[in-house]
Image: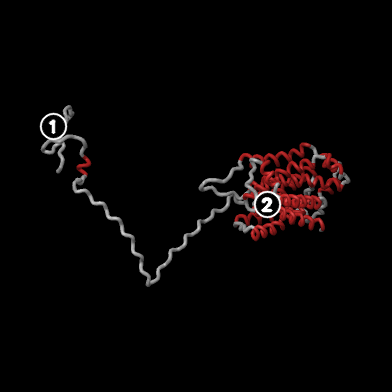
Amino acid sequence: MEMIVLACLAQVVYIVAFVLCKTATGRIRPIGGRRPFRAAGLLLRSRRWAAGLLVLIGGFALSAFALGDLPVVAALPAYGASLVLLLAVGMSGFGERPTAREWLAVLITVAAMGSAALSITSGAGESVLDALHRAPGGAEAAAALPLWKAALVVVPSLALPLWMFCVHDRAVAGRHARPVTGIAYGLGAGVLLGATEVFGLGMAMMPARGDGLGVLSTPHPYLFLAAGAPGLVLLSIGLQRCRLTIIVTVVTVTAKTHLLLSATLLYGEPWPSDRALFMLRVAGVLLAVLALSAFPRHERRTRPEPRPPAERRTSGERRPPAEPRPPAEPRSVAEPRRTAAHRALPHGRPTDDAGRWRTPPGDPAPGHHLTRRM
């Protein structure tokens, strides 16, 4: 029970860190993924963002310590309960109003975490550390961390955000362009922060095995920094451009799903052997993917402000006189009125004294004259 409370406390610490980063990015110049070093420099010069970074690292430590004695799926209800606090902070502190579709996505997220947590209710539920101690050579394998397993976690975690933000990170412009809600930012940052939690969990397991000083000889701390640094930059970009509730919800769903699957691959996170419980856990993963697809990609269109109504006149008030129109210019008397017959006649042909058109010499139809009405 103490570890569950600790997991809930870690989520509260996460939200405090995200709020500090959100307010810090609102006070600095715009940052983007195409210039990551400039973005990192602007962030590091902000004291508020640095304080948020320290709080976030504390949340990582609390979460990793709790997951040392808890299965990953056992802590998922704590993550779902933290979304309630997140929505309260976003709506009261930042004036954000989720749409009906976003509320549906949040409900699917809670259902996904609840379905995964139900898969261990009828069983004891082993933690990652228990599974490593039970498996022959499991602890040594986790400390060694084979390169092919680390590559399966790190390479997609780095490739997806780099492709998203170095190629498609463009400002929204144009008359009919609609601002994005930040799904891509949340996915990229969530994948990286999920990998960060995985390697932080590996570092937390080593002091429990008595290998506290040997953690520096493993790839865990270096992969922790390699995934965490770009993840924090992308998270800060999303917090600066988009709403807090959307970014943090997508980051949470993506990071916890990534943590569950990666801990299964790297450390042997135990899955239930019963078929019904196994399907519950698979349903939790599928519901998490469905929740991510349910979030809208663009913000809703804002209606134009209505014009103020015209002032109504009272019964005794007279209508103001209309402005007089300018007088029309008089037509020149000498200018003749041109009729349709005149407009149909060719111009520039000579006439005789009787007013008939003269046929120029060499006309192919001699004797054919056009007369003009006077």
Q: Is residue 215 left or right of residue 246?
A: right
Q: Residue at x 16, y 37 (%)?
A: 370
Residue at the limit of the structure toward the right, as seen here: 210
Name the disc covering residue 24, or none. 2
Classify mark 1: residues with Cα within 10 Å, few (<14), some (14-19) or many (20+).
Answer: few
Position of the C terminus by quadrant:
top left
Q: Is residue 335 left or right of residue 162?
A: left
Q: Given the image, on which type of amino acid does mark 1 rest?
A: Gly
User: Can I make out residue 190 in this image?
Assistant: no
Q: Is residue 208 left or right of residue 57?
A: right
State the SS at label 2. Answer: helix
Q: How many marks?
A: 2
Q: Nearer the viewer, residue 372 or 262?
A: 372
User: Can I make out residue 135 in this image?
Assistant: yes
- Residue 194 % position (x, y): 73, 46
Q: Given the image, on which type of amino acid does mark 2 rest?
A: Ala
Q: Nearer the viewer, residue 164 or 358?
A: 358
